[in-house]
Image (cartoon, rainbow, N blue to C red):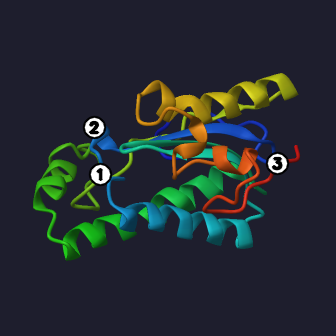
Amino acid sequence: MGRSRYKIYESTHPHFITCTILHWIPIFTRTETTDIIFECFKYLQQNDNFQIYAYVILENHLHLVASSDDIGKSMTKFKKYTARQIIDLLKVKNVKTILDQLEFYKKAHKKDRDFQLWQEGIQPKLITTEKMMIEKINYIHQNPVKRGYVDEAKYWRYSSARDYEGVDGLIEIEKMW
């Protein structure tokens, strides 16, 4: 995973993962950008044995608990694809302010591109116990509540909290671990 200081030692086991937009720029305020995230999740589910146990997408980052045949490679594919698609969308929509920020805050060693969308790394944390899995899922689902966006986690559209309440969410998740 690039120049990240975080290492993945059990690549097929569930991990708590955080992906953050460069400089915390609010990218996920448009349904078109979150649609790109879900499109990529679905692709990885079909092609990488990518299993999502919980997720939340906020305006400038996302958290998930996921596993795959190789979580590091799956997340590399995820970040590469979503970055390209979101930057292309921002160009088409002429969102110059955000594009200027993505260009300005781009890391100096990224000489092969004009823009950088994601911060480097995914901050993976191996889920080692059922207790830890439950803690991470609760943390993910409570994130929008703690920020004051909703009163109850199940009301946040871009979260698997509704799946755990028996309501179909926006993407298939795995509730058995």
Q: Are marks 2 and 3 in contact (CB under 8 Å)?
A: no
Mark 2 falls on what kind of element? helix
Q: Is residue 37 left or right of residue 68?
A: left
Indicate which disc, 2 or 3, sits on the residue closer to the N terminus.
2
User: Marks 2/3: CA distance?
Assistant: 33 Å
Crowding at dot 3, Cα within 10 Å, few <14 / some 14-19 / many 20+, comes out as: few
Callout 1 amino acid: Lys
Extreme residue toward the front, this view: 151
Which residue is tagged 1?
Answer: 110
Upstream in sequence: badge 1 or badge 3: 1
Mark 2 or mark 1, which has the lower sequence index? Answer: 2
Q: Residue at x 43, y 42 (%)?
A: 61
- Residue matched to label 2: 23
Left or right? Give the position of 143 relative to 168.
left
Mark 1: few/some/many CA within 10 Å (<14, 14-19, 20+): few
In which image quadrant can residue 137 be found? top right
The residue that label 3 is drawn on is 175
Q: Indicate whether 92 appears above or below 99.
A: below
From the image, state whether disc 1 or disc 3 is nearer to you.
3
Query: Measuring 30% from the left and 53% from the top, which residue is drawn there?
Result: 116
Quarter containing the C terminus: top right
- The local secondary structure at tag 3 comes to loop
Q: Quadrant of residue 130?
A: top right
Q: Amino acid at mark 2?
A: His
How far across and down, in percent of the image, does residue 88 sit? 29, 72
Residue type at tag 3:
Lys
Q: Nearer the viewer, residue 105 or 9?
A: 105
